[in-house]
């Protein structure tokens, strides 16, 4: 059945630039002439009436041409996937629309996410002439989409076999990031969307179905990573978890070499290997972000519950292989949510061999030791930690957590001594250190001899002026910034 939408397609197939204003004027004149001729045939009274009909026809024709040149746009509240594939023949265009674009839309419609996908076609006569991001970005902004995939389809004969040759490129919107990360993301996009695909005409239905499924997986992966780069951890994690369940884990090397027929995977092995890696990164990022949110609103423990869920997803993505990135936040959650000090201590002790020089686990373990009553062990851990490079943000997080714990649990008093050491040797803040020390000595009477000696030594140090009459401050060299939580997260 013939459709008016096919007119621009047919025109572009014959090399006519449908978006040219000359084409618009020609269509306007044709419409005006048709209206004028109809008026004369129907016997319109007078030349003035015929002229009015000619102008009306001209305006209508030009308006219809403008509407046919309007760029399709994404729907509000949806993730817009724009596909602009140019074809040489009408049959190629039909295949792209029915067996490729519609199949991709069907595959992506399975996702029941907060922001569903909307796949829409950019007709060939409107497809942008782009070769890089700079050329694609204005068009993507105009169509209000999030991901633009453009390319072409050609029918060629290879080894005496008629073959569809499909070439694709893509660009996605996300927050501004460093050049190195942008380059790495571009490489991953190439794994998600292959540059060239060949489909035999003898097996075109199955070939287009397989290609469409593969592209839909790639699209979901790209959108998930772009969301993570923009800080939308929840949406990114949701997409990657669904994708992990859909494509499974990559086969082992042994299984790859196994002879015999195996079901062809929907995603490439490279993408199967990337998904669990990026899922782990995103889950850990969401965990740290939720902990940071809790630090600003400690009345909302649901934030910590979300952090723990993401942390377990991180562990599963790592094939349940625990490591330093898991033990530190998990210990925090064990203490804060359940006050399980034994579990937290076990995890923190594992960090000694994994990261011997990182002060985070020592500072965290020191806190647990104090709560358990092993104050001298905690002080030794603090001494060892403060001898290393400690980021200022980590010290602020620890002090904030200690003060919150003291206000919520009303002790133990020895935490004030640790806070005094942190303010004296870490933050170099004399007033806060003396205030904490005074509180400790007031609440912790009588003092054990070792603790009394440490407190008196610290007081002498705090009250000892240097040659200029100022407090002697311990130098602290900050390390590069890293994600921090409400206590010494790695």
Image: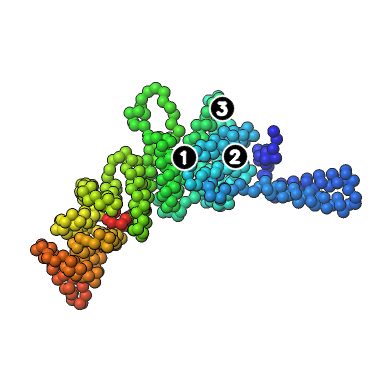
Q: Which quadrant of the view contains residue 318?
A: top left
Q: Determine if residue 451 is in view.
A: yes
Q: Which quadrant of the figure contains the N terminus? A: top right
The residue carrying pointer 3 sits among few (fewer than 14), some (14 to 19) or many (20 or more) residues within 10 Å by Cα, namely some
Between marks 1 and 2 in the image, the one whose residue lies nearer the viewer: 1
- First in sequence: mark 1 vs mark 2: 2
Residue at mark 3: 201
Report x, y in % for residue 123. Answer: 62, 42
Asked if labels 2 and 3 touch by Cβ distance under 8 angstroms, the answer is no
Q: Determine if residue 358 is in view.
A: no
- Tell me how many marks there are: 3
Q: Residue at x 33, y 48 (%)?
A: 308
Report whether 191 appears left or right of 142. left
Residue at mark 2: 86
Between marks 3 and 1 in the image, the one whose residue lies nearer the viewer: 1
Alpha carbon distance from label 1 to label 2: 20 Å
Report x, y in % for residue 106. Answer: 53, 37
Report x, y in % for residue 243. Answer: 43, 39
Alpha carbon distance from label 3 to label 2: 18 Å
Q: How is colour applied across the structure in the image? A: rainbow
Where residue 218 is drawn, which disc sits there? 1
Seen as rendered, the residue at the extreme left is 449
What SS does tag 3 mark?
Answer: helix
Where residue 469 is drawn, which disc sits there? none
The residue carrying pointer 2 sits among few (fewer than 14), some (14 to 19) or many (20 or more) residues within 10 Å by Cα, namely many
Report whether 439 appears left or right of 230. left
Q: Residue at x 36, y 29 (%)?
A: 256
Q: Residue at x 43, y 44 (%)?
A: 238
What SS does tag 1 mark?
Answer: helix
């Amino acid at each position: 059945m013939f459709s008016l939408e096919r007119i621009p397609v047919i025109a572009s197939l014959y090399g006519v630039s449908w978006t040219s204003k000359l084409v618009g004027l020609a269509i306007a004149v044709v419409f005006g002439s048709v209206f004028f001729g109809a008026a004369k045939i129907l016997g319109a009274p007078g030349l003035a009436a015929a002229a009015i009909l000619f102008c009306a026809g001209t305006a209508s024709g030009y308006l219809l041409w403008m509407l046919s040149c309007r760029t399709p746009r994404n729907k509000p509240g949806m993730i817009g996937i724009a596909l602009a594939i140019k074809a040489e023949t009408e049959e190629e265009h039909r295949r792209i629309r029915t067996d490729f674009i519609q199949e991709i839309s069907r595959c992506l419609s399975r996702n029941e996410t907060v922001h569903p996908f909307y796949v829409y076609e950019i007709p060939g006569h409107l497809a942008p002439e782009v070769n890089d991001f700079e050329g694609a970005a204005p068009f993507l902004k105009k169509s209000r989409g999030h991901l633009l995939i453009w390319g072409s389809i050609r029918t060629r004969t290879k080894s005496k076999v008629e073959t569809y040759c499909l070439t694709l490129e893509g660009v996605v919107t996300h927050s501004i990031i460093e050049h190195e990360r942008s380059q790495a993301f571009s490489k991953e996009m190439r794994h998600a969307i292959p540059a060239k695909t060949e489909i035999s005409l003898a097996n075109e239905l199955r070939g287009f179905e397989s290609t469409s499924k593969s592209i839909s997986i790639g699209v979901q992966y790209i959108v998930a990573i772009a969301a993570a780069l923009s800080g939308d951890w929840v949406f990114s994690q949701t997409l990657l978890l669904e994708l992990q369940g859909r494509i499974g884990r990559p086969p082992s090397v042994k299984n790859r070499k196994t002879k015999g027929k195996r079901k062809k995977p929907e995603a490439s092995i490279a993408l199967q290997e990337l998904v669990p890696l990026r899922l782990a990164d995103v889950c850990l990022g969401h965990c740290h972000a939720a902990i940071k949110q809790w630090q600003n609103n400690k009345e909302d423990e649901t934030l910590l519950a979300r952090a723990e869920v993401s942390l377990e997803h991180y562990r599963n993505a790592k094939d349940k292989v625990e490591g330093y990135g898991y033990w530190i936040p998990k210990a925090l959650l064990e203490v804060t949510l359940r006050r399980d000090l034994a579990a937290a201590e076990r995890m923190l002790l594992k960090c000694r061999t994994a990261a011997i020089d990182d002060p985070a686990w020592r500072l965290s373990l020191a806190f647990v030791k104090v709560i358990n009553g092993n104050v001298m062990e905690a002080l030794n851990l603090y001494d060892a930690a403060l001898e290393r490079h400690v980021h200022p943000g980590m010290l602020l997080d620890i002090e904030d957590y200690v003060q919150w714990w003291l206000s919520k649990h009303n002790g133990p008093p020895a935490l004030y001594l640790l806070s005094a050491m942190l303010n004296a040797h870490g933050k170099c803040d004399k007033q806060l250190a003396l205030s904490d020390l005074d509180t400790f000595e007031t609440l912790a009477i009588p003092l054990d001899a070792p603790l009394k000696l440490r407190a008196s030594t610290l007081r002498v140090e705090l009250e000892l002026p240097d040659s200029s009459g100022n407090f002697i401050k311990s130098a602290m060299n900050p390390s590069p910034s890293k994600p921090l939580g409400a206590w010494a997260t790695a």
